[in-house]
Image: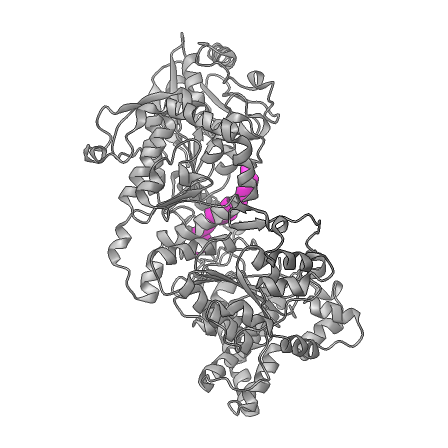
């Protein structure tokens, strides 16, 4: 996102140009991953973690490069003195040099779309594309429904459809998802029906959450998708705990957790940061000084990659490989997907109050992940304009129907208010339930009639 | 890591001294992992005289032994913890089940919730992936005991000024996540196997942070249970119940009785029920309600008056019926806790009993509690009565309680 902001402040900025430039200088990555025997250039570009690359690229303005050279020379015993410290020997130096706050060169962004030659089936890509369109359509329809007062709240995933669907497609069904809240597409990919989404948003009795949470707080045990919780990033350490359980059970699965731009343990967990540039109204330039999120992975000793979040193929590839590494090597992986929150933060927000409309427009059109992917699928001959319009109309109708059906389903019974606080209802809650029922009986006019007693 | 090293390097000698000191105190407790202990009938046997942390150690050992899917983790627990409560467990059960975590309280509890969610709702894995997990796993007790705070104990005692903002660091994960995990998912998921242990309360020199009694904060959070034992025997039985409880439990261990109180504890596996108060001493003039270390102070204050002393044990959900029955008998109620009086759990008990027994009460409900100040180091004797309580029969606080009892009885 900072890419965009930089561009916005400069005059004529072009994402494509920047990405292709950085893409070309990808020779450093081989060094970084060769040692892991995983140096397929298709999957990795520009993630440099080797000391040599690190030193030569980032410390030219300081004395660090010299320092490294000196350290590698056996002649100078003085310089070779050091201290054995947990984690490895640390060399001494008499030269005082501070590590720079960040490197001059930003970490590159992995992108593949527009390139050719992906040996994957057309069916899968079509399915992925359909998912993206479905998510987009569901968002539009439910957003409108919220505006009409039929839902109390909604959050769209506009602009992040690729991250949603492509990452889901790259995962196995057994992989456990600990979502934040802008990942409905993952659940969609796993077969959560439009009716199920709508039931949750309407909080009717078929909502798995029993109408207790705000709309978009989906969760489904059978889909291996933990229930959304409003506080952000609480799911990150939980994901590590879940992954530890998988590790102990020697399961062929990993945990995937999503979070926004806002523990080190050797367990199979993939952290996917949807860096969409905005934490409600706080742009990432005000959020952190470092080069985004990807650099933080290295500080924690986590293998990390930056990916173009609007490139469905890049996401698909990166998540697929991350999953494989996570499970095979039982290690955490961090993926930073650069994208943009095209929609408002939620239905309670008007983002034009704090960001320029042309910025939103740029990401909505030129960088629209659904359009970008559609072009590619159509170029491949797997999708046509006719299919497009028919599918969109069809999905729209399905969502409308689901809303109508969902609205007719009654609300959860009053007893559901008191269950699940604990495994069994304790005496204080029984007492309170009696009291509430008594009051409702005496003053029925004070209570909504659509809650079955 | 650097923090860790600095800590250990700088304070190494003191640390060793106190470790020895602790060992001396718990020298009679070399019963860890005893097979014989398992053979005894639950709760039976005379048992040895041990202190609270040895009792905790026994409970943890039993929990790990009886449930292969139980884990203990926290800061420094791997080597036994500075309170020695996890001594020998890593050796016996392996470092994959008893392990250290980084010094990151949020991370520890979050990790615990995630792990407990998997251990608790095992159907989760079996039904979906249709694979290798035997169904018998469902019969295992779900247990994930998070032993977070105990390591800091030695620092507490040595007055090392570490940041023990226990509630502020953990409260987000306990309040927003652990407590609501089941409710918010409509029982699709739960983390009921989670038990969070934490020493609490005044210890004579803890100052603002290390002497606090935060139980009321957690009692205001539906979805978790709060349990506080008064003795080693209670600690062992209640901890095992908490671990096997299908709801997340915050288990507070009174620091002050850690070393001063060595009592007989049955060997082997036994549990004490949660949400059941216990009448420790019967009487007819006044009902005294308390929990944790405060009970021994209250007991000393009972001299000369026929007091009915009740240990609440589980603060939420609490046993109103036992307290109500007692107050109906005595007509008077006094509640005492170390935590500040305003908004303390005593207020909740008082309100509930007034609601239930208003016409039977012969005097206003009295509360003898901590003051509404941060825990004041040099004024601790004024704030509450821990100093020299073993040597002095009726310390300062007892006199206050005694006065309050007399006032209430003579009202």
Where does residue A131 sit, x and y in percent of width and height? 50, 77
Residue drawn at (51%, 75%), measured in percent from left and top? A317
Magenta-colored segment: predominant secondary structure: helix
Where does residue A188 sit, x and y in percent of width and height? 47, 72
Residue drawn at (53%, 71%), measured in percent from left and top? A164
Residue drawn at (51%, 16%), measured in percent from left and top? B387
Q: Is residue B178 magenta?
A: yes
Nearer-the-camera pick, B107 or A368: B107
Location of residue A79 with respect to B299 vertically, above or below: below
Q: Residue furthest front?
A: A75
Q: Which residues are magenta?
A: B166-186
Nearer-the-camera pick, A287 or B385: A287
Where does residue B231 sit, x and y in percent of width and height? 37, 25
Nearer-the-camera pick, B264 or B322: B264
Residue drawn at (47%, 43%), measured in percent from left and top? B222
A280 relative position to B161: left or right:
right
Quarter of the rendering containing residue B390: top left
- The quadrant of the picture occupied by the N terminus of chain A is bottom right
Q: Is residue B275 magenta?
A: no
Looking at the image, can residue B50 be seen? no
Location of residue B213 with respect to A313 vertically, above or below: above
B370 relative position to A416: left or right:
right
Q: How many numbered marks appear?
A: 0
Quarter of the rendering containing residue B29: top left
Where does residue B404 sit, x and y in percent of width and height? 50, 13
Report the colour scheme: one colour
């Amino acid at each position: 996102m900072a890419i965009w902001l930089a561009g916005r402040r400069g005059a004529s900025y072009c994402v494509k140009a920047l990405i292709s430039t950085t893409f070309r200088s990808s020779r450093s990555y081989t060094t970084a991953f060769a040692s892991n025997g995983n140096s397929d250039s298709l999957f990795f570009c520009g993630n440099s973690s080797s000391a040599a690359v690190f030193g030569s690229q980032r410390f030219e303005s300081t004395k660090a490069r010299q320092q490294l050279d000196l350290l590698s020379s056996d002649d100078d015993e003085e310089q070779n003195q050091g201290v054995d410290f947990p984690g490895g020997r640390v060399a001494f130096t008499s030269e005082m040099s501070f590590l720079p706050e960040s490197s001059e060169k930003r970490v590159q962004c992995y992108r593949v779309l527009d390139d050719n030659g992906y040996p994957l089936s057309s069916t899968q890509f079509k399915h992925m594309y359909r998912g993206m369109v479905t998510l987009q359509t569901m968002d539009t329809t439910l957003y409108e429904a919220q505006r009409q007062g039929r839902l109390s709240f909604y959050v769209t995933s506009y602009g992040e459809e690729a991250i949603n669907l492509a990452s889901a497609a790259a995962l196995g069904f057994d992989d456990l998802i600990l979502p934040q809240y802008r990942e409905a597409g993952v659940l969609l990919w796993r077969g959560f029906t439009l009716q199920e989404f709508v039931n949750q948003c309407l909080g009717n009795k078929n909502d798995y959450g029993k109408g207790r949470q705000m709309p978009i707080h989906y969760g489904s045990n059978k889909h291996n998708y933990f229930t959304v919780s409003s506080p952000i990033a609480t799911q990150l350490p939980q994901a590590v705990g879940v992954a530890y359980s998988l590790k102990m059970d020697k399961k062929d699965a990993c945990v995937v957790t999503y979070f926004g731009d806002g523990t080190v343990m050797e367990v199979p967990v993939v952290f996917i940061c949807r860096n969409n540039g905005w934490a409600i109204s706080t742009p990432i330039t005000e959020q952190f000084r470092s080069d985004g999120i990807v650099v933080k992975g290295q500080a924690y000793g986590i293998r990390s990659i930056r990916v173009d979040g609007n490139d469905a193929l890049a996401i698909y590839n990166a998540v697929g490989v991350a999953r494989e590494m996570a499970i095979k090597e039982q290690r955490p992986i961090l993926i930073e997907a650069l994208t943009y929150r095209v929609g408002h933060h939620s239905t309670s927000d008007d983002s034009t109050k704090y960001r320029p409309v042309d910025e939103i427009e740029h990401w909505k059109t030129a960088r629209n992940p659904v359009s970008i992917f559609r072009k590619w699928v159509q170029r491949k001959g797997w999708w046509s304009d006719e299919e497009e319009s028919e599918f969109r109309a069809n999905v729209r109708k399905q969502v409308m129907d689901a809303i109508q059906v969902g609205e007719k389903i009654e609300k959860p019974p009053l007893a559901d208010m008191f269950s699940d606080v604990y495994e069994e209802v304790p005496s204080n809650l029984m007492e309170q339930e009696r009291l509430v029922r008594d009051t409702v009986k005496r003053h029925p006019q004070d209570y909504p009639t659509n809650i079955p007693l | 890591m650097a923090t860790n090293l600095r800590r250990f390097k700088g304070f190494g000698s003191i640390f060793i001294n106190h470790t020895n000191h602790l060992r001396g105190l718990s020298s009679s407790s070399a019963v860890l992992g005893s097979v014989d202990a398992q053979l005894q009938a639950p709760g039976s046997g005379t048992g040895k005289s041990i202190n609270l942390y040895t009792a905790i150690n026994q409970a943890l050992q039993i929990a790990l032994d009886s449930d292969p899917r139980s884990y203990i983790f926290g800061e420094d627990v791997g080597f036994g913890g500075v309170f020695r409560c996890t001594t020998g467990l890593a050796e016996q059960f392996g470092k994959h089940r008893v392990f250290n975590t980084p010094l990151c309280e949020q991370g520890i509890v979050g990790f615990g919730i995630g792990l407990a969610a998997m251990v608790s709702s095992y159907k989760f894995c079996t039904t979906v992936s249709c694979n290798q997990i035997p169904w018998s796993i469902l019969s295992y007790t779900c247990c994930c005991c998070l032993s977070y705070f105990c390591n800091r104990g030695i620092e507490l005692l040595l007055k090392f000024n570490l940041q023990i903002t226990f509630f502020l660091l953990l409260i987000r994960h306990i309040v927003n996540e652990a407590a609501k995990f089941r409710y918010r998912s409509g029982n699709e998921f739960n983390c009921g196997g989670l038990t969070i242990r934490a020493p609490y309360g005044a210890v004579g020199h803890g100052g603002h942070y290390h002497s606090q009694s935060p139980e009321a904060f957690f009692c205001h959070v539906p979805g978790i249970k709060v349990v506080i034992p008064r003795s080693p025997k209670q600690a062992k039985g209640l901890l095992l119940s908490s671990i096997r409880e299908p709801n997340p439990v915050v288990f507070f261990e009174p620091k002050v009785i850690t070393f001063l109180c060595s009592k007989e504890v049955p060997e082997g596996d036994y549990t004490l029920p949660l949400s059941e108060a216990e009448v420790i001493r019967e009487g007819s003039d006044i009902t005294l309600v308390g929990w944790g270390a405060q009970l021994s102070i209250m007991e000393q204050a009972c001299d000369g008056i026929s007091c009915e002393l009740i240990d609440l044990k589980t603060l939420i959900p609490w046993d109103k019926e036992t307290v109500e029955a007692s107050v109906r008998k005595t007509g008077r109620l006094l509640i005492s806790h170390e935590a500040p009086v305003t908004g303390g759990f005593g207020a909740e008990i008082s309100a509930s009993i007034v609601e239930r027994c208003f016409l039977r009460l012969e005097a206003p409900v009295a509360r003898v509690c901590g003051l509404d100040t941060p825990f004041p180091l040099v004024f601790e004797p004024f704030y509450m009565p821990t100093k020299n309580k073993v040597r002095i029969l009726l310390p300062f606080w007892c006199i206050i309680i005694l006065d309050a009892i007399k006032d209430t009885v003579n009202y």
